[in-house]
Image (cartoon, rainbow, N blue to C red):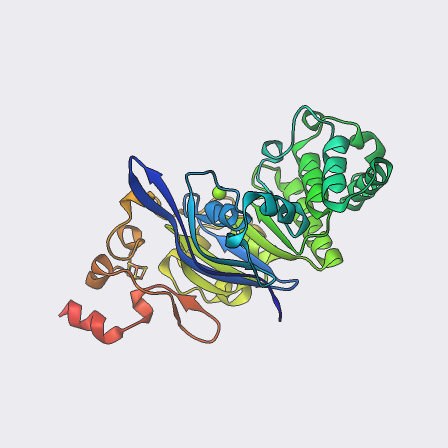
Amino acid sequence: MTNVLEVYGLTTTFTKNNKEFKVVDDLSLYVGKGESLGIVGESGCGKSVTSLSIMRLLGKNGKIEGSIQLNGTELLAFNEKVMQKIRGKEMAMIFQEPMTALNPVLTIGKQMSEGLEKHEGMKRAQAKQKSIELLTQVGISRANEIYNEYPHRLSGGMRQRVMIAMAIACSPKLLIADEPTTALDVTIQAQILDLIQKVRVELGMSLIMITHDLGVVAETCDRVMVMYAGQVIESADVRTLLRNPKHPYTIGLIHSTPHKAKGQKRLNSIAGSVPAPDEYPKGCRFAPRCDKAMPICAEQNPQLMAVDEQSQCRCWLYQELDKRSAVNV
Ligand code: SF4
Ligand code: MG
């Protein structure tokens, strides 16, 4: 499989009061052509900063190191002007709250047409026709009317459909969806997930789905990476991860995901909270919340390592057993 995106050693650092904090710490990932990768974790684990780093949409404060290659081209070598051409055309992003990305004072049509005129060099009439086609493609029935509406006149679900239409306007190779259904009602959530799947298949697009919800991953992703405190702590194909999770944090996440088929609404959440980047513990970053913690866990942060053919995991339970028993003695 050819990879659309390859990221190596991505480290994103923010500076606060003259101190540097790694919000994303040495993260590597790849997304194959047409493949869908889930990035999962509680809020504050670095999922959104990872996606904003890939899109190069961080403010001046965020420093990005490592390598981000889109179809073999190094994005970190480009200036903002070049990135503006790549965003939207080669890769696009949709957010939890579409209003943050939509301009409230411009009609839907104006915003869509502007993108097509800029990226695809279309004339106004052609851009309008294409916009209406796109709105229809994302399941908006009165596309002609919606074209002339302002964003605040639409429901959350409709706005997310518009965002998807705008994101796919130039047929990008990669779509990054950051919690695209979190702000929506449950029934609308399912429709939007179905829509993302539909356009992904239609356009042969690769997808990064960022979510705190393993149910969303189960429905939309081929592979999944779990993040905790700025690091990847487990990665596997979705089936393996859901059936045979390795890392205590992943196991906790699965136990705190309600099982729809069993009619469960709420389950135990993992006790404690994600440490802030300036409060990462010295050893395993999950140790203060982990019921399997051993003495070495407080001392050394484990590496992300292959556990078997399907999974990688960052946990002392699965590596260097001799070292662990030595510390325990
Ligand atoms: Fe728990 Fe130790 Fe594994 Fe961290 S390394 S998840 S503390 S067992
Ligand atoms: Mg987020």
**Residue at the left extreme?**
329
Q: Observer-nearest residue: 268 or 202?
A: 202
Q: Observer-nearest residue: 5 or 142?
A: 5
At x 66%, y 62%, the residue is 34
Image quadrant for the N terminus? bottom right
At x 31%, y 67%, the residue is 317
Ligand 1 lies in which image quarter?
bottom left
Q: Is residue 243 left or right of residue 128?
A: left
- Residue 37's spot in the image, x, y percent? 56, 59
Residue 230 visible at all: yes
Q: Quadrant of residue 208?
A: bottom right
Q: Is residue 267 left or right of residue 84?
A: left
- Residue 115's spot in the image, x, y percent? 72, 39
- Answer above or below: position of 292 versus 91: below
- Residue 168's spot in the image, x, y percent? 71, 48
**Residue at the top extreme?**
105
Q: Quadrant of residue 109?
A: top right
Q: Observer-nearest residue: 266 or 68?
A: 68
**How many marks on residues?**
0
At x 45%, y 38%, the residue is 60
Image quadrant for the C terminus? bottom left
- Residue 78's spot in the image, x, y percent? 54, 51
Residue 275 visible at all: no
At x 57%, y 39%, the residue is 96
